[in-house]
Amino acid sequence: MLHQLSGNSTRKMAAKRSFNGTESCLEQRIEKKRPRQTFAKIIGEVVMVNSVRHLSKALEPLLRQVVNEEVDRCLLRYSRSLTRASSLRIQALEPSSFQLYFVNNLPSTIFTGSKITDVESKPLRIAVEVGGEDPSLLPISSLLKIEIVVLDGEFAAGDREDWTAEEFNASIVKERSGKRPLLHGEMNATLRHCAATIGDLEFTDNSSWIRSRKFRLGARVVSGSDRDKFPRIREAITEPFVVKDHRGELYKKHYPPMLNDEVWRLEKIGKEGVFHKKLSNHNIKTVQEFLKLYTIDPQKLRMILGVGMSEKMWEATVKHAKTCELGSKLYMFRGPNCLLFLNPICEVVRAMIGDQIYSFRDLHNIPEAYLKNLRRQAFDNWASLQDFEGNLRESLLLTQGNEESDCTLGKSLFQSSVEFLSEQLECQDWDSNSDNQFNISATIQGNFHYNYG
C-alpha cells in the first residue's frame, strides 16, 4: 500500500515537472517572437504622429467650410419646406396679381466684368404686370424702388410661379467668403410709370461654385418704399444662365458669326489650334474667306482642314458658318461681254451675258460650267472687284409671288442696276481694252432684253 502511494506521488511530481518545463519553453518562444523596439522605429512613430497632427490642422478649415455649407443647405431646405407648408396662409394674407417681370431676355452665357445686357445687347428693362388686378390700386405716379439680386439657378424650377416672398429671399445667393459682392454697379432702380431701365451692372464672380452651376437675376420691391400702400408685387426672375470668367470671352464663339469675324469664331475651330493654323496658312483668316472658298471649291476647303476634322465636326463648322448674316453689299465682276453681281460669299445674284439679263431665279438657264468658270474668275480677282450697297432681299423677291408682279418688279430692279452701272462706267477708268469697254457701254445704253424664264 505504501509502495503504491509513493508510486502515485512520484508520477504526479514527474507530470508537474514536465508541465512546468513545457510552460517555460512556451514563454521563451513568445519572448523570441516579440519584436524588439529599436530607436529608429520609435523615432519613426513620433514623426508619423506629428505628420498626422499637421495634416489634421491643415484640413480643419476645409472640413469646417464643407460642414458649414452642408448645414446651410439643410437649413435652406428646411426653411423652404416650412414656407411651402404655410404658403396658403401667407398667400391668403397677400392676395395679388401684380408682378414684376423682365421685359427682355438675357443670353445663356454672361462673362464677369462685362455689362449685363439682353440678347440684343440692349439694357435690361423691368415692368409691372397688372394681371387681373384693378390698375388703380397701383397708381402710375407712384415711385417704387426695386432691387436687383442674384438667385440660385434652381429657384422656381419647372416654370413655377407660386413662390412666396420668403422663398424668394431664401434663394438669394451671396458672394463667396473673401470675395467681392456678386453684383457690381447700379443694383437699384425706380419704377416710373410702372417700368424701369437697369443701368450698368456686372458680375464679379462666376457661377461654377454653386451646385446648379447657374444663376438667375431677380428683382424685388425694396422694403420701406411705398410697397406698404399697395398689395404685394411679386418678384421678377430671369431664365437660368451661366456666368464665366471674362478670360473665356476671348475665346467666345459668335452666334451668328459676322463676315469679318476671325475664322476661329466658328464651331470646332479653336484659336491657335491645328485647324486655325491650317486655314491661316492658306490665307483663310475670316468667316467671309471661309465661306467664299466653300462656295467656289468645298472639296479644297475640306482637304485643307484634313482628316483630323471628322465629318461630324465638318458639318457643324459649315452649319455654323452658314448662319452668318451676309448684309446688303454686292460685288461687280466684269468679264468678256458679261457682268456678274455677286454677294459677299461669291454667290451670283444677277448676271448680264451679252444683251440678256438673268435674275436670281433665271441663273439656271446659264450653262453651269460657264457660270462656274465666271465665278472662279471673280473669286481669283476678288480684290479688284468693285463693291456697292445693294439689296439682296429685293432680288430674292423675284422667286415669290405671281409671274406678272415678278416681271414688273424685275424690270424696275434691273433698270436701277443699269442706271447705277452706267454712272460707274462713266466715272471709272477701266484698265482693259477699248473694245470691251465699248461693247459694255453700248449694251447698257441700248435696249435690254429681260429674261423672264
Image (tube, rainbow, N blue to C red):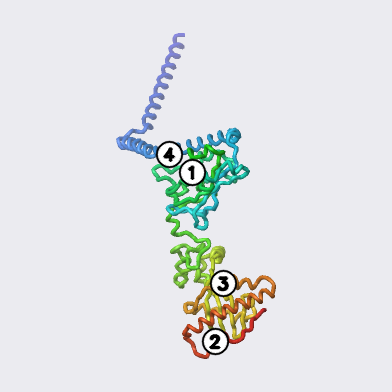
Give the image location of residue 52, x and y in percent: 37, 37
In this rendering, the answer to whether 250 lies above or below 303 is: above
Q: Name the residue under label 2.
A: 441
Tell me whether the residue at label 3 lies in contact with that at label 4, contact meaning CB atoms closer than 8 angstroms. no
Task: Name the element at disc 1.
Answer: strand
Rounded to the nearest angstrom, the CA distance separating label 3 from label 4 is 62 Å
Q: Name the residue under label 3.
A: 391
Front disc: 1 or 3: 1
- The dot on residue 145 is 1
Rounded to the nearest angstrom, the CA distance separating label 4 from label 1 is 36 Å
Front disc: 4 or 1: 1
Q: What residue type is labelled 4?
A: Gln
Label 1: few (<14), some (14–19) or many (≥20) C-alpha neighbours in 10 Å: some
Front disc: 2 or 4: 2
Instruction: Say whether disc 2 or disc 4 marks the residue closer to the N-terminus.
Output: 4
Rounded to the nearest angstrom, the CA distance separating label 2 from label 4 is 82 Å
Tell me whether the residue at label 2 lies in contact with that at label 1, contact meaning CB atoms closer than 8 angstroms. no
Front disc: 2 or 1: 1
